[in-house]
Image (cartoon, rainbow, N blue to C red):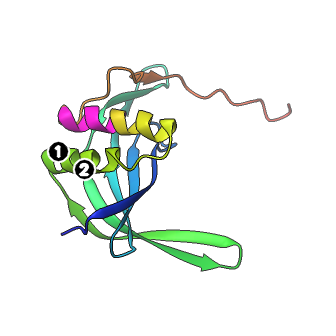
Amino acid sequence: MLPPITAVASIEMIRDGGSLRAEFVGTNGSSYCLHFKLISKDGSAGELVRVGYEHPVVYERLEFREGNRVEWQAINQVDVSWAHAVALLHQLRDLLKSEEDSKWLSAMEEVANTGGQVPRDMPRVLQPVHQLPRDA
């Protein structure tokens, strides 16, 4: 069972093409993440097509520092229902620090309320990244 939430660290879309993550801190001082992993497929022209999200998971996030390097590890991962995800997201709303966090929280709420569907405002298709020629 998660401790009560005391602060929002960040809410964002991850650079994998659309997974969503809310990081928050519990009363015990531990960092946690609510994560919606993107389900995608390759389109015929090499584009990424967003088709939905896997069931949500919550995990504790441990950070390890070595010199100037920071690494983290997910532990105690638990699958949660979409209804539980909605309840967690509602708790985060009153603790938001920025408009950017609010934007991604709204996207996560829409995903959770629709059982994993891509939000209406999020493009379903991402065009392929064009690479520069090697001799450029």
Identify the residue at image location x=43%, y=22%: 125
Q: Position of residue 45 (x, y in %)?
A: 48, 19
Give percent across and percent down for residue 87.
19, 48
**Res 64 quadrant in image:** bottom right
Q: Amino acid at mark 1?
A: Trp
**95 w.r.t. 13: above or below:** below
Residue type (three-letter) at the residue carrying disc 2:
Pro
Q: Is residue 35 above or below residue 108?
A: below
Q: Are marks 2 and 1 in contact (CB under 8 Å)?
A: yes
Q: Main secondary structure of the magenta part?
A: helix
60 displayed left or right of 86? right
Write the residue at 50% across / 41% down: 98
x and y percent of residue 133 in the render?
77, 30
Q: Residues within 10 Å of mark 2 (few under 14, many from 20)?
A: many
Q: Is residue 24 left or right of residue 79?
A: right
Residue at coordinates 49% horizontally, 35% vertically from top-left? 99
State which quarter of the image contains the N terminus.
bottom left
Q: Is residue 79 left or right of residue 12?
A: left
Report the residue marked by disc 1: 82
Residue found at the very far right of the displayed protein = 135
Residue 46, disc? none
Q: Quadrant of residue 26?
A: bottom left
User: Could you say whether the residue bearing mark 2 is in a helix, strand or loop?
Assistant: loop
* Residue range (magenta): 107-113
Question: Which quarter of the picture shows residue 78?
Answer: bottom left
* Disc nearer the start of the sequence (2/1): 2
Q: Is residue 6 above or below residue 107?
A: below
Mark 2 lies on residue: 56
Q: Residues within 10 Å of mark 1 (few under 14, many from 20)?
A: some
